[in-house]
Every structure is written in structure tokens, then in C-alpha cells.
Image (spheres, rainbow, N blue to C red):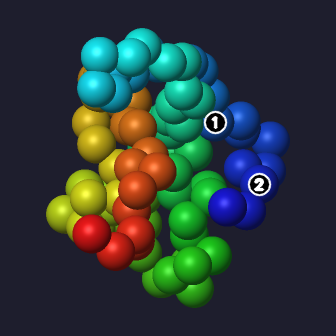
Amino acid sequence: MPPCYGVAHQVDLATTTTEGTKAMTPRETYTKKTLFLSQAPNFNFELNAEQILEKALEAGFVTKIGDDLFEINNSYGEAN
């Protein structure tokens, strides 16, 4: 992903459970603004922050986890 030009996104650790095993995995989170800053170039700057967020939510690229906090789906685009 391109850099967020002065506004950093957050990466924290989340506890995930897989078949009874707990593991700490990185969880990449963005606000609407940082998502816009990182993804606007992919849309040739033709979409505003709300439009990019709406597309990201519809496509399953991000999941809402807080008031203005969205988690990136690390499995996005992988074949099932």
C-alpha cells in the first residue's frame, strides 16, 4: 500500500484463535481519512473519502471495528 503522507495508519496486534491455538497477528487499521489517503491514487483521485470507504466496505476490503476505525481484510483478493 502507498504511504499515508503524514498521517500514519495503525498496526496493532490482535489475538486470533485457530484450531484451539492462540496467536498474536498484526491487525492493520485505518480511519476514513487514512484509508482515503492510501487508496485515492488507486482511483485516480476521482472518488472522495466517503465513496472510497463505501466501496471498501462493500467489497470486503475493510471491516468497521469502531466509530471511525476500519480493519483491513488481509485475506482480500485471495482465492477461496
Residue 21, quarter of picture: top left
Give the left or right position of residue 49, taking residue 13 as reference. left
Looking at the picture, does residue 78 appear above or below residue 32? below
Instruction: Return the residue at label 2.
Output: 3
Q: Check disc 2: other Cα within 10 Å, few if <14, some if 14-19, many if 20+.
A: few
The quarter of the image holding the C terminus is: bottom left
Residue drawn at (63%, 36%), measured in percent from left and top?
Answer: 9
Per the model, the C-alpha gap separating discs 1 and 2 is 9 Å
Q: Position of residue 53 (x, y in %)?
A: 34, 56
Is residue 49 visible to the viewer in this orientation of the structure?
yes
Q: Identity of the amino acid at label 1?
A: His
Query: Which label's residue is closer to the chain start, 1 or 2?
Result: 2
Q: Kindly identify which numbered label has been placed on residue 52.
A: none
Residue drawn at (39%, 62%), measured in percent from left and top?
Answer: 76
Residue in front for this viewpoint, 12 or 5: 12
The quarter of the image holding the N terminus is: bottom right
Residue drawn at (28%, 42%), measured in percent from left and top?
Answer: 63
Q: Position of residue 30 (x, y in %)?
A: 50, 38
Label 2: element kind = loop
Q: Identity of the amino acid at label 2?
A: Pro
Is residue 54 visible to the viewer in this orientation of the structure?
no
Instruction: Return the residue at label 1.
Output: 9
Label 1: element kind = loop
Residue 16, quarter of picture: top left
